[in-house]
Each structure stands twice: as C-alpha cells, then as structure tokens.
Amino acid sequence: LVEAIANQVGVALIQAEAYAHLEDLNQQLAALDRTRSNLVAITGHELRTPLSTIQVCLESLSTEPDMPPELRQVMLNTALSDAERMRKLIQDFLTLSKLESGRVDWNPEPLALPECIDLGLSHIRARHNPQDLPQIITHLPENLPLIEADGEWLVEVLAKLLDNACKFTPHKGKITISAHPRDKRMLQVTVADTGRGIEPKRLETVFDRFYQEEGALQRTTGGTGLGLAICRQIIQRWGGMIWAESQGKDQGSSFHFTLPIIPSVETPPLKNKKRT
Ligand code: ADP
C-alpha cells in the first residue's frame, strides 16, 4: 500500500511539474506573439512612410509633364533615397529577425581584432565621401589576445558602430577605436566619437528597435533604427555585453563591447633530457 501511495504521489508530482512547464511555455509563446505583433505594426508604419513619399513623387512626375527640370530632379532624388531607405529597412529587419529567432549559422573562429577593424573601416570608406569623414584614430596595444567570435558578424558590428560615429560626428570631429583586456576572460573594444552625444536617459533606449532620436519624420541621417539592436544580438551571442556612455548633448559618445578572449596555450618549458 505504501508503495502504491508513493507511486501515486510521484505521478502527481510529475504531472504538476509538467503543468508548470506548460504554463511557462504558454507565457513565453504569448510574449513572443506580442513581440511579433509589435514588430509587424512598427515595420508597417516605418515602410508606409517612405512608400507614400515615393508614390507622391511618381504621381507628380507622371501628371505634371511641364514640371521644371530642377524640381523633376528633386522628385527623382527623393523617390530614389526613400526606395534605398526601404531596402535598408527590409534588410536590417530580416537580419534582426534571423538573429532573434536563432536562425544564424555561426562560424566561430579565432580572430585578430586589428584585421577586423581594418575590414570595418573599409566598409565605412566605401559608404562615405572621404571629405565628409571625421578623423579616425586607432589605439591598440601590441600583443592583443585573439578573440572568439564569427568574423563576418564582428565586422558588421564594427561597421555599424563606426557608421553611427561618422553620421553623428561633424567632419572636423574625431573617432577613436581602442581595445584592452578587461580581465583574463574578456576583451573590451571601444568606438568613441566627439559628436553630438546622447542624453543619459537615452543611453539604454538607443539599443531598442527603431529608436531614433529624431523620430521617423525628421530623420536626416538615413538610418533604420535597427543597427544597435542588431549589434546587441550579435555580441550577446558570444557572451559579451554592449553599452553606450556619454556625458550628454554635444559631449561625444562611446560605445563599448566585450568578447571572449581565447586563452593562450602556454608551452611548458622544455626539460633538459639526458642523452643516453
Ligand atoms: P540608426 O540606423 O538610426 O543609426 P541605430 O540603432 O544604429 O540606428 O542607432 C539608434 C539611434 O541611436 C540613432 O538614430 C541615434 O539617435 C543614436 N545613436 C547611435 N549612435 C550614436 C552616436 N555615435 N552618437 C549619437 N547618437 C547615436
């Protein structure tokens, strides 16, 4: 009888645990569903704005054949830049969804930071007019340890941080890239600029999806508001952190992130073996 009761108690306990698990799963699914609906709503809004502009421009171009050539050019340029904005938005949105749903095939490899920085810088030089770029300085100690991450994605993080630093720093300003081992486990990388800075209360919000200080309508820098959310997903994948620091408006900003160091294999000292 004691054995039967014990069995029943055991079964009841397992059932209770399974129910608790199911309840937990239900809550997680509901949260995911809320996130998905939010994303669909925000993305719909963000796409509709440039699409409406393109439509207005094309309509004017087709219904006003006598439009002065300068105005025609302005209309064409506006339509083209909004089409480019939509393309970037869709690309960043797909990248973020892929990262968030864990559908990325990561390729971990030992990486030398200076090479990744060089690749990040060449992306920036290809994207910006050299005359518009602020001065860019790299301060790296010698013998930096190798880090473990996926090279392509790390270059993506560096390019996005550098791109932001360029966008929000006047061309007489300065961008400094530096790095140092934070402890034995993690390397800290910093991209600092002397640009427009970030208010203290926004230092965390800048990592939210679609956050842009100007808001969607006054946006002048052509970003999507998804770059830092993408960076955070990538860095967190490797157990690192990413955060922003700024003393406030016009005081410049620093973006820091950490990545795991690959422990160097120390070769044991050779023993003097006696020849026989
Ligand atoms: P965006 O595509 O707009 O650059 P991000 O996610 O990369 O999107 O950045 C979000 C917002 O964070 C930017 O629109 C800007 O308001 C702020 N931000 C990012 N980097 C900087 C920086 N270096 N200096 C000042 N503000 C920045």
Image (cartoon, helix red, strand yellow):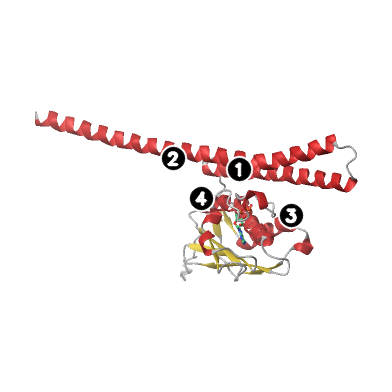
- Three-letter amino acid code of the residue under disc 4: Arg
Ligand 1 has an atom within 8 Å of the beta carbon of the residue at disc 3: no
> Of discs 3 and 2, which sits in the foreground?
2
> Of discs 1 and 3, which sits in the foreground?
1
- Three-letter amino acid code of the residue under disc 1: Phe
- Three-letter amino acid code of the residue under disc 3: Arg
Choose the circle earlier in sequence order: 4 or 3.
3
> Of discs 4 and 1, which sits in the foreground?
1
- What x and y, as percent, mark residue 76? 82, 43
Residue 10: image quadrant is top left
Q: Is residue 71 above or below residue 147?
A: above
Choose the circle earlier in sequence order: 1 or 3.
1
Please name the residue that numbered disc 2 is placed on: 31
Choose the circle earlier in sequence order: 3 or 2.
2
- Quadrant in which the N terminus is drawn: top left
Determine whether, in the image, residue 260 is placed left or right of residue 249: left
Which element type, helix, strand or loop, lies under badge 1?
helix
Q: Residues within 10 Å of mark 2 (few under 14, many from 20)?
A: few
Kindly identify which numbered label has been placed on residue 93: 1
Choose the circle earlier in sequence order: 2 or 4.
2
Please name the residue that numbered disc 3 is placed on: 127
Q: CA distance from mark 1 to mark 3?
A: 20 Å
- What x and y, as percent, mark residue 94? 61, 41
Please name the residue that numbered disc 4 is placed on: 237
Choose the circle earlier in sequence order: 1 or 2.
2
> Of discs 2 and 4, which sits in the foreground?
2
Q: Nearer the viewer, residue 253 or 60?
A: 60
Which element type, helix, strand or loop, lies under badge 2?
helix
- Three-letter amino acid code of the residue under disc 2: Ala
Mark 1 and mark 4 in contact (Cβ < 8 Å)? no
